[in-house]
């Protein structure tokens, strides 16, 4: 007798605004804190998630992701961390501004800017990020209970990569040159498993006036 597939909703949450986001720094796996605005966004997204029946929290271990979930976890909802949900490893690009990268690696920057999935010097490609983020969700699904609603706190890159996977879209190159626009800080996107259906995308209705003042930039990372 075949086990019935477990139905699990994954609510993908990009962390609240972090220090360096407004400057468009390549933060990656640098463990920077939330900004003041980001902490306010964390309160609002946690309130929204608290009304959805979330049963568990799965978070990147970087503090800007886990801190976004702290108000929700404080209500008694268990939280686990998984390093596979981290943002891309920017290697030697970590902490730099786009213009600094362009100055030091002009040829590589041009390839990146035009959509190639380049490997950062001593870092990762987007394909690497997608592979480990998918592995994190699939591992969680194995231990999940039928009907679970899991809040997944991660970052812009892994979140877009998971959405593209759920939609069956090929990565092809840089995720920020693909069909999915950059995901907003403290937004919620929903992936329904095991069918890999999208139940919501980049929802920021809970943020009201606290939508980040920084305009969306096409090449966010």
Image (cartoon, grey):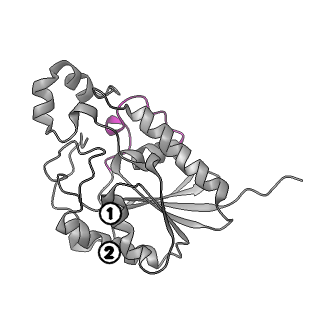
Predominant SS along the magenta part: loop
The residue range painted magenta reads: 167-182
Task: Identify residue for label 1.
Answer: 186
Mark 2 or mark 1, which has the lower sequence index? 2
At which x and y percent is residue 73? 43, 74
- For the C terminus, the image quarter is top left
Task: Identify residue for label 2.
Answer: 44
Q: Residue furthest right?
A: 1
Residue beneath the point at 15% across and 21% down: 106
Q: CA distance from mark 2 to mark 1?
A: 8 Å
Q: Quadrant of residue 201?
A: bottom left
At which x and y percent is residue 151? 48, 64
Res. 217 in view: yes
Image vertical order of residue 8 relative to residue 97, above or below: below
Confirm whether the magenta stretch covers residue 197.
no
Confirm whether the magenta stretch covers residue 177.
yes
User: Helix, strand, or loop for circle 1?
Assistant: loop
Image vertical order of residue 87 relative to residue 120, above or below: below
Is disc 2 in contact with disc 1, using a CB cutoff of under 8 Å?
yes
User: Helix, strand, or loop for circle 2?
Assistant: helix
């Amino acid at each position: 007798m075949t086990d019935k597939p477990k139905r699990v909703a994954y609510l993908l949450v990009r962390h609240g605004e972090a220090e360096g986001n407004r400057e468009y720094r390549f933060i990656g796996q640098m463990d920077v804190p939330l900004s003041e605005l980001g902490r306010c966004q964390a309160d609002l997204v946690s309130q929204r998630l608290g009304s959805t029946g979330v049963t568990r929290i799965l978070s990147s271990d970087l503090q800007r992701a886990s801190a976004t979930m702290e108000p929700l976890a404080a209500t008694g909802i268990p939280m686990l961390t998984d390093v596979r949900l981290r943002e891309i490893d920017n290697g030697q690009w970590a902490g730099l501004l786009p213009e600094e990268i362009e100055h030091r690696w002009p040829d590589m920057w041009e390839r990146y800017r035009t959509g190639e999935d380049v490997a950062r010097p001593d870092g990762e490609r987007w394909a690497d990020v997608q592979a480990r983020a998918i592995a994190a969700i699939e591992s969680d699904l194995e231990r999940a209970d039928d009907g679970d609603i899991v809040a997944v706190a991660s970052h812009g890159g892994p979140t877009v990569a998971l959405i593209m996977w759920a939609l069956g879209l090929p990565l092809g190159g840089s995720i920020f040159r693909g069909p999915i626009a950059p995901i907003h800080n403290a937004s919620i996107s929903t992936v329904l498993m095991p069918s890999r259906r999208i139940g919501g995308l980049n929802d920021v209705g809970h943020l009201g006036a606290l939508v980040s003042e920084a305009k969306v930039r096409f090449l966010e990372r």
